[in-house]
Amino acid sequence: MRLTTVALAALPFSALAAPQIPSPPIPSPGEIPVDVPGGTVIGAVTGVESFHGIPFADPPPRTSFVCGHREGCSAAPSTFNATVFAPGCPQIPPNTTEVLLPKLLGKGMMPPHWPEDVIKGREDCLTVTVQRPKGTQAGARLSVLFFILAAASCFGFLGGAEVLADDRANLGLRDQRMGLEWVADNIASVGGDPDRVAIWDQLAGSISAFDQMAL
């Protein structure tokens, strides 16, 4: 399961283990660099400082930028552009037929219509987005809000005897747990407090939040 937003109560994120880091690049106007153990992440500055789509685990090709020192991650020191939104995980169509639903509070309730053979998103989606108040520094120890973005993807929760026998069940929960481990290992690098992390979501994501507390 995928795209995760980490918010610091004034909000932070980040990291990775790796060798020596080169001098950080000079940011463009509206950008801000943050040094993490595996390199430099370039974020965008608007009302807050945002770092989008930071990988917390290796994608299927096993060629991630950086994701911490936990098993399942590789370290590749570099500079990562986190100024643009990351793509979501593969999603099945929420609506493949033209079904008319009544308006609710004056707003249309029709989900977007996709052709049945169209899958949106990409498999390389094990990322976090970190947002924090302007001017936050490492060591600020802000409270962390870990938001698991609800999605219609079923690929992290495949069923069947073969999946169970291959120990591949509940991969979505395992992905989420890697994201939480990444926060525990690295959030202090951008001003978060790893000892004050709250998990939150709504709809399908609220079930994941419950499951993570129960694991």
Image: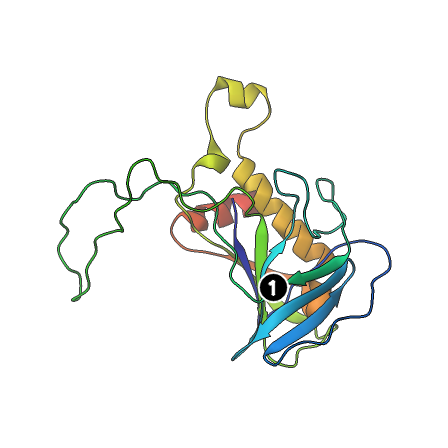
Q: Residue at x 69, y 52 (%)?
A: 65
Is residue 166 or residue 76 the one in the foreground?
A: 76
Give the image quarter of residue 30: bottom right
Q: Residue at x 17, y 66 (%)?
A: 105
Location of residue 171 with respect to 132 vertically, above or below: above
Is residue 141 or residue 93 the one in the foreground?
A: 93
Determine the secondary structure under disc 1. Answer: loop
User: Label 1 crowding class (10 Å Cα cut-off): few <14, some 14-19, many 20+?
Assistant: many
Give the image quarter of residue 136: bottom right
Location of residue 107 with respect to 3 vertically, above or below: below
What amino acid is labelled 1 in the image? Answer: Ala
Q: Residue at x 60, y 25 (%)?
A: 167
> Dot 1 corresponds to which residue?
82
Q: Position of residue 61 (x, y in %)?
A: 64, 38
Is residue 65 or residue 102 the one in the foreground?
A: 65
Location of residue 118 with respect to 41 vertically, above or below: above
The quadrant of the image that shows the C terminus is: top right
Q: Position of residue 81 (x, y in %)?
A: 63, 63
Q: Is residue 199 left or right of residue 69?
A: left
